[in-house]
Every structure is written in C-alpha cells, then in structure tokens.
Image (cartoon, rainbow, N blue to C red):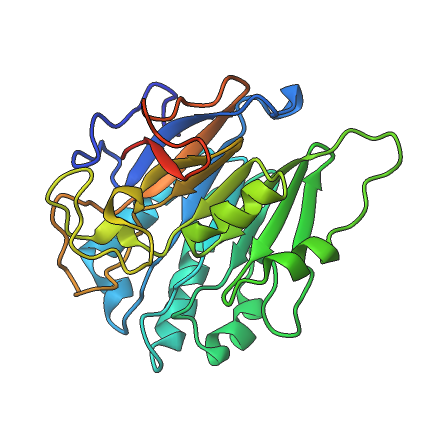
Amino acid sequence: MIPDTLQTTAFRRPVPPEPIEVFDIPHPALPPALEGLRILHISDLHVRRHAPGNDRWQRLLDAVSRVDADLVVLTGDYTDEPGHERAALDALQRLADAWPAPRLGAFGIFGNHDTSELLHRAGNVRGVTWLGGPGRAPRWASPCADLRIIGLDYPEDFVSAMLDQPPCPPASPRPFTIALAHYPTAVIPAAATGIPLVLAGHTHAGQIRLSSRLAPHTSSDVPPHLAAGVLRLGDTLCCISRGLGDGVMEGLRFNCPRQAPLYVLRRGPLPDAPRGSDPAAVSQVVAW
C-alpha cells in the first residue's frame, strides 16, 4: 500500500515506488461520497515484443501490486505497432493480475496505436471492462450511484458517446462524470457539455523535455506547455499522464520519467488558472 503522504516534488523526480505518483485532484462538484476516491491511471504502454521481460516492466508490476486504488482506468496505446498485439495483450493481463482488485473495477479505452486485432482480442483480458471498441460496446459505466464513466476511444466521437449515456432517474442528483479519452483535446467538448474531469494520455508529456513548459515533440496537436499535468477549461479539468512506454524512440526519455498517476479526488475549489490567462482558453494549472 502506498502511503497518503507520498507526493512527487517535481515532474523530473519520481518518488519510489516508481512510476507511481500520487496527486490530489480537487473539484467542487465532487459528491461527498467520492471524497478520497483513489484512481490508478495506466496509459501509453507502447508494448514491443520484448518489453514485458525487461527490468522496467518488472518494476512496474511490483509497484502496481502495492497500489491501494478504488478504480483503475486505462487510456490507450497498449501496443506500439502492428505485429506486437500478443505481447501487448499479455502485458495487459499481467497488469490486471498484479493490481489488487479495485472495489469499483477497472475500465479501459483504446488509442490510435491499438490495431483492430488488439481491439477484437482485448475482451479476453480478464479484469478489465472496455468502454467502446468493436461493435461500439457500451461506452458508459456506473460503478456506483455517485459516479459515471464515459469511454472515448480512438477515433473519439464525443457527440455519439453523449447520446449513448443512460438517463438519470427523475429527481436524482447528477452523478460525477469522468471521461476517459486518449487525446487530451477531449477537454474542449467535455467542458462544452459540463463533464468535470477528463483522464487522458497520448502526448507522453513530450518524452523529451527541456523544461516544464518546453517539449520539442509532444505526439499530439497540443502545444508543449499543455502536454502533461492538469489542464483547465472553465469548470473542467483534464489530467494527462506522461505514459509508461516510449512512443517516439524506445528507451529515450529526458526530463520526463514514465508515470502511472494515482489520483486522489477531493471536494474543493478548482486550481487557479495562471494569472493573465484567457478564461476561455485551455490552461495548465498543475505541472508534473
């Protein structure tokens, strides 16, 4: 079990057990029943055939096995390229076997590197419920009365997913909604539709960073200063994982360690946007 006091001191300094990093995520719309909810975020494994046998992979399995999480979410790019699906599926199963059973379950979506073969075979991974994918499986889940999860797998169709959501019973309070998205740009439609929290990946935080706000390449259309950490647009937050694999060049990371965030949800005011920032634009409110 990871102590509640564990915190990272900077985005370049992971704290053991690496790559788990713990962050408080405040939001005023969080129901009291979800105060302290712990969410383990797995993203961007980019598994190659040999990856599950290396020391880094064993450290990840060991760290995950000691995480006390209420919910596990996975946000895509499990394989690196076609032909590596078997290794990626094996990696996913080993992860699902390693983490202690979360009381609210584990839910996943797919990314742009995940092939049709992986999507069709992912249903065989025990312990993970996929939101979306082949046949457009249910994209919504309600692991408890106060929480609703929407899955936006690649290619993301936010409008269609919103239309698929089950109605709330009359006179019932609206559940707190978390959107799982591969692309962090999902924060824009999420804010437009009132979804308070998005969990995303895809950027690998740039993998190579010259500073907390300068990444020469982000694997995304987001600018370098928005490639990791917590973004805010209106009342919507988007947490972007730095990822666990190498999507640019294998083994190449500079100032950007691999990361499996463990979010602790808190009921409280939203983080302030930087002074002078445009309230109608996306801004980074926490860097990691």
The answer to which of 221 and 262 lies nearer the viewer is 221
- Using residue 10 as the reference point, say whether residue 187 is left or right of it: right
Q: Residue at x 53, y 31 (%)?
A: 235
The quadrant in which residue 271 appears is top left
The answer to which of 115 and 237 lies nearer the viewer is 237
Report how many numbered discs are placed on residues in the image. 0
Q: Residue at x 33, y 49 (%)?
A: 61
- Using residue 200 as the reference point, say whether residue 210 is left or right of it: left
Residue 137 in view of the camera:
yes
Q: Position of residue 185 (x, y in %)?
A: 44, 52
In the rendered image, the quadrant that contains the C terminus is top left
Q: Position of residue 6 (x, y in %)?
A: 31, 23
- Using residue 64 as the reference point, say whether residue 168 is left or right of it: right
The quadrant in which residue 11 appears is top left
The answer to which of 54 and 188 lies nearer the viewer is 188
Look at the picture and state if 153 lies above or below 61. Answer: below
The quadrant in which residue 176 appears is top right
In the rendered image, the quadrant that contains the N terminus is top left
Q: Position of residue 246 (x, y in %)?
A: 23, 60
Residue 97 in view of the camera:
no
Q: Residue at x 37, y 28 (%)?
A: 23
Look at the picture and state if 229 lies above or below 97. Answer: above
- Using residue 245 as the reference point, say whether residue 32 is left or right of it: right
Q: Position of residue 97 (x, y in %)?
A: 46, 53
